[in-house]
Amino acid sequence: MPHEHTRYTSVISTESATLVSVSDPASERYTAAPAPASLQRVQSFLNTRSTGLPVEPDLLARPASANSWLRTLEWPTTPRLTADDLTSLRELRQSLQAQLEPGRNTSQMATQGDLALHLEKFRWKMTLREGQLALSAEGGGWRQVAGALLGDIFVAQQHELWPRLKACRNPLCSVIFYDSSKNQSRVWHNTLVCGNLINLRASRARRRQEAS
Ligand SMILES: [Zn+2]
């Protein structure tokens, strides 16, 4: 049985409409470079996956862990997620993850189609609140969460922040990190953890090849 994480009990919330970075327990457990506030929900959502060494649990596996994860971040609405909601959210997470993983075996077109199928399940509405336009998905439960995430991605794409959100190149890891480097060239979620490991393996393989 996976152990429960209890270290993220402090929930920071503000009444302000502008997003501020809060503690992101999902990404912090993988020590992934954090995204700016506008992409934090998306990064956190993707890092609810079970991965890493040692393996961390899937925070969307059960309603209890999913709901406590949801409440660590700020959302337009925070519905109480059910097991059915989680099935849909895990599917969405998988197709978003596929968009970010470099060199996956599945073709680009296949993963694009996968996400497009999810998008067909949504109806959108635009609202005006204190002079700010906001896009939200109609419906309850997981649609509220997914709608906020897709809205964040939409905005990030307009501001060219989206390409900076990356999946670690180590296929066993694929943790989502934010590349804030000037030339946008980072490939490891954490150079110490994944970069060194892969470089070590590559140099061992080279040595073996040279010796044979
Ligand atoms: Zn990694």
Image (spheres, rainbow, N blue to C red):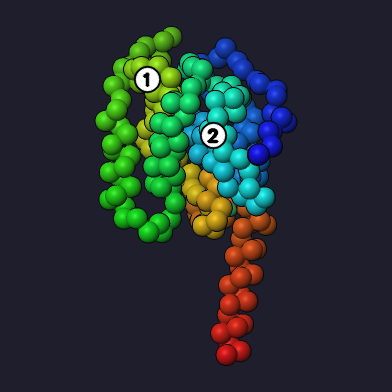
At label 2, which amino acid type do we have? Answer: Ala
Helix, strand or loop under label 2: loop
Residue 102 position (above or below residue 121): below
Does residue 191 appear left or right of residue 85 in this picture?
right
The residue shown at (73%, 31%) is 7
- The residue tagged 1 is 136
Q: Residue at x 54, y 25 (%)?
A: 63
Instruction: Please report the residue visible at 55 percent of the width from the left and 56 percent of the height from the top.
Output: 172
* In the rendered image, the vertical position of residue 134 relative to residue 38, given as above or below: above
Residue at mark 2: 61
Report, in whole angstroms, how far the alpha carbon at label 2 lies from the one at label 1.
25 Å
Is disc 1 surrounded by few (<14), some (14 to 19) or many (20+) residues within 10 Å? many
Q: Residue 102: percent from the left, percent from the top?
A: 43, 55
Q: Position of residue 170 (x, y in %)?
A: 54, 58
- What amino acid is found at the position of numbered circle 1 in the picture? Ser
Q: Residue furthest top?
A: 130
Relative to 139, residue 161 above or below: below
